[in-house]
Amino acid sequence: MCLLLGASGVGKTLLMKRLQKMISKDAEDPSDVPPTQPTVGTNLTDLTIHRTRVTVREVGGSMGPIWSSYYKDCRSVLFVVDASNPFQVSASCIQLLMVLSSPFLAAVSVLILFNKMDLAGSMSLVEIKSLFRMDDITSCAKQPISLLEVSAYDGTGLQEVLRWLQSSKNSRT
């Protein structure tokens, strides 16, 4: 099980829909952006990536206080941050630190996705890493942490997300 976490409105649902569309054999035009609505509760999705099945549980951002109830069966974490919203960065950083400090997640792989990089006002990776103090976080974390710049809207970086999900799953089996 891979958990997909992040604050409300960061693009988790669109990310999942785009990943599903990318691996679907009968996919329509990949440039079509599927409609989304805020996740209430959780969404469970199975992705089959080159014969590797990965189950992803998207947990709504408003459910942050109870995310920990989903940690027990987790093997990896996708943590999404809205790179276009500097006001949300500190809240996202606190959420990330709470995720990383859980004993249930001490040995899981974590991929932090800086989403919405396609928007004109988005912070650069250097700015976000500085605001998050990513060097400090990665040096203190017990988990292996990877970072990616993505756009769930235009598909930038999503192939790398699929590769990470597949390799994370294969390294656990």
Image (cartoon, rainbow, N blue to C red):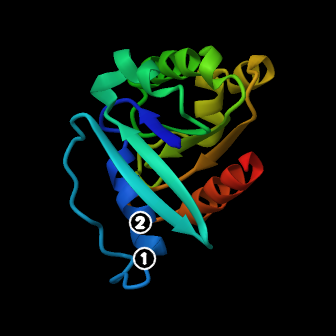
The residue type indicated by label 1 comes to Ser
Residue at 64% x, 15% y: name it. 103
What residue lies at 61% left-to-right and 21% top-to-bottom?
A: 104
Between the C-alphas of marks 1 and 2, the distance is 6 Å
Where residue 47 appears, x then y in whole percent?
Answer: 48, 62
Q: Is residue 104 left or right of residue 170?
A: left
Q: Tag on residue 59?
A: none
Neighbor class of circle 2 (other Cα within 10 Å; few <14, some 14-19, many 20+) is some
Q: Which residue bears the numbered disc 2?
A: 20
Q: Which residue position holds label 1?
A: 24
Residue at 72 percent of width and 55 percent of height:
170
Label 2 near label 1: C-beta < 8 Å? yes
111, 84: nearer the viewer: 111
Q: Is residue 13 visible?
A: yes
Q: Quadrant of residue 135?
A: top right
> Which is more toward the observer, 112 or 127?
112
Q: Secondary structure at mark 2?
A: helix
Kind of residue at badge 2: Gln
Q: Nearer the viewer, residue 170 or 84?
A: 170
Residue nearest the observer in this picture, 85 or 31: 31
